[in-house]
Image: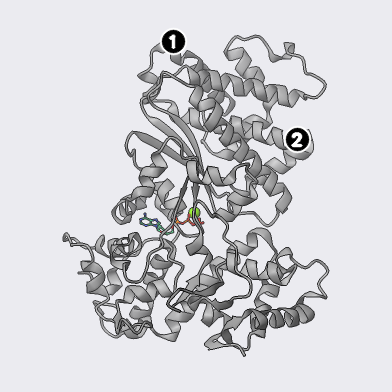
Amino acid sequence: MKPIAELSLGYSDAENYQRRENKDLFNSVFVKNEYLEDLLDPSTFFLIGEKGTGKTAYAVYIANNRYKNTTGQLKYIRETDYVKFVTMKKQEQLDLSDYSAIWKVILLLLLAKDIRGEELSENPFSKTMKMRRLMGVVDDYYQNAFAPEIVNALEFVKDSKISAELVAEALRLGATKSTSTTKNESRFQVNLLFVQRQFEDALRGLKLKNNHVLMIDGIDIRPGKISYEDYLDCIKGLADASWSLNNDYFPSIRDSDGRLRVVLLLRPDIFNSLGFQNASNKVRDNSVLLDWRTTYPSYRSSMLFALADRLLASQQTEFLEKGTAWDHYLPFVIDADNPNRPTDNPFIFFLRYSYSRPRDIVTMLSILRDETRAKLPGAPTTFSKQCLESNDFKSSHSTYLMGGIRDQLAFYYSEDDYETFLKFFTFLDSSWEFSFGSYRDVFSRFKLTSVDHLEAPPEFLGSEGDFLQFLYDTNVLCYKEVDENDKPLFRWCYRERSSANISPKVKLDAEYRIHYGLLKSLNLRRRKLR
Ligand SMILES: Nc1ncnc2c1ncn2[C@@H]1O[C@H](COP(=O)(O)OP(=O)(O)OP(=O)(O)O)[C@@H](O)[C@H]1O
Ligand SMILES: [Mg+2]
């Protein structure tokens, strides 16, 4: 097997695998499992998972490969898109339903673009006429340089007056000028609706052989310049548009084997903030929820272990039985913290120090490779226990984990709020475990010195209960319960989450413990606060 220095462990963000030169690498490391099949289900409209659980990875896999008669496109919402939306909102005095209408046209345009080519040539000509003419309009508008990105589609929408006229002309429908606006409608809205109808009509006429799925990513990133309210309006419009296309319009296309679908990639907290009605039904019936939980005793049959093992095995030229590559590269045991098991496989260390997410595992292996290269002389062929358990490894890993929490916070809050958040931990007297009573005491001292003087304290610091829930939501801490045999059970938000319980609640009046992986960054030790 390859020496450590030659291991290429890929990328920790799957966005990189969309580049042509990385496609083969990705296909060799990607682990196909039930989530991929679920994503192909015609009723899947949301792909939900915490940071680093593989949302982008699944979408990239579908976009890169024509998997089971499904062609996919993965598009990202970028900062420029939000900026355009906000400008348009001001210019045209738009409200939420306009946002939804705008998104509908964008989504239809992007889907239509994907259908051109082979699918059209196989359709009876009469059925495709309308689509050809429409796409002719799009080509003219962009002078044959339409790159199917949200930002470009948005331009077409923004110029709705021109685009509606071009569409009317091409379809010989007579100018839209003749349609009058009612009191509550603006010209912009009428034009937009007209364009939307034409696209809907054109798509309805087609007999598709393949399924076409449009996946939208990047929703979880709020650019610093855009206010939370503006951002939320924009993505609520997107959610509304895709829901309505998926539920009302696409199913109305009969006679076609291939189906159209839009899938949104979302973090659970953002899915919640969309304020859907019957949100829990939508999670159960229309979502894939990425969940990589396993237990220490059954780690070896887990998907997460398969992912780690595959990453190492994919580098080798020979075929390897499952688990061989892992056992080769990590040929040692670690101390168990359970009296029933004297030792553990090093994978348990990965589980203990991570949130059981693919990105954690990929990143830990990369850090370990770098540590091994830097610390061990010669050309090591395996990882060492000493490197895995070293302070340097734990520090780098801890920094990575805190980075994830910081990103998640940045979505709702400012950099200053993050700094305030960090101050809380300085009141813990370096301890990682505390009772509810101690927590209240710590929180009130923290509030007095670091929060009360703030002009606009962040919402998560509203009350001691709010903050505790916040620490739980971000997986900074868990609460402890005991089972009937007095065995401790550690309740983590990411482990309690399920489609029936998408935002788990922290228990008050319990004992709490901070995550292993964060101790280094937060300067805490494994001891209980008195
Ligand atoms: N099924 C899988 N097989 C192999 N690798 C995977 C799989 N799922 C995820 N990964 C790897 O895990 C890492 C994180 O995945 P990804 O970037 O898709 O996470 P994400 O959920 O999109 O995170 P974010 O919310 O930060 O965008 C990537 O390196 C990706 O390649
Ligand atoms: Mg992603």
Q: Is residue 20 visible?
A: no
Marks 2/1: CA distance?
Answer: 37 Å
Q: Quadrant of the C terminus?
A: bottom right
User: Residue 209 in the image: x percent, y percent?
Assistant: 36, 25
Query: Which residue occupies the foreground of this view, 277 or 189?
Result: 277
Q: Residues within 10 Å of mark 2 (few under 14, many from 20)?
A: some
Vertical relation: 257 (above or below) 394:
above
Q: Could you tell me which residue is drawn at 68 percent across and 12 percent down?
A: 175
Q: Residue furthest left?
A: 318
Q: Amino acid at mark 1?
A: Ser
Residue marked by disc 1: 126
User: Residue 410 in the image: x percent, y percent?
Assistant: 64, 62
Q: Residues within 10 Å of mark 1 (few under 14, many from 20)?
A: few
Q: Could you tell me which residue is drawn at 53 percent across and 64 percent down?
A: 493
1 displayed left or right of 68: left
Q: Could you tell me which residue is drawn at 61 percent across and 81 percent down?
A: 435
Q: Amino acid at mark 2?
A: Leu
Q: Earlier in the sequence, mark 2 or mark 1?
A: 2
Residue marked by disc 2: 94
Residue 22, numbered label: none
- Cβ of mark 1 under 8 Å from ligand 2: the answer is no
Number of residue marks = 2
Q: Could you tell me which residue is drawn at 56 percent across and 36 percent down?
A: 242
Say which quarter of the image contains residue 140: top right
Vertical relation: 368 (above or below) 299:
below
The kind of secondary structure element at disc 2 is loop
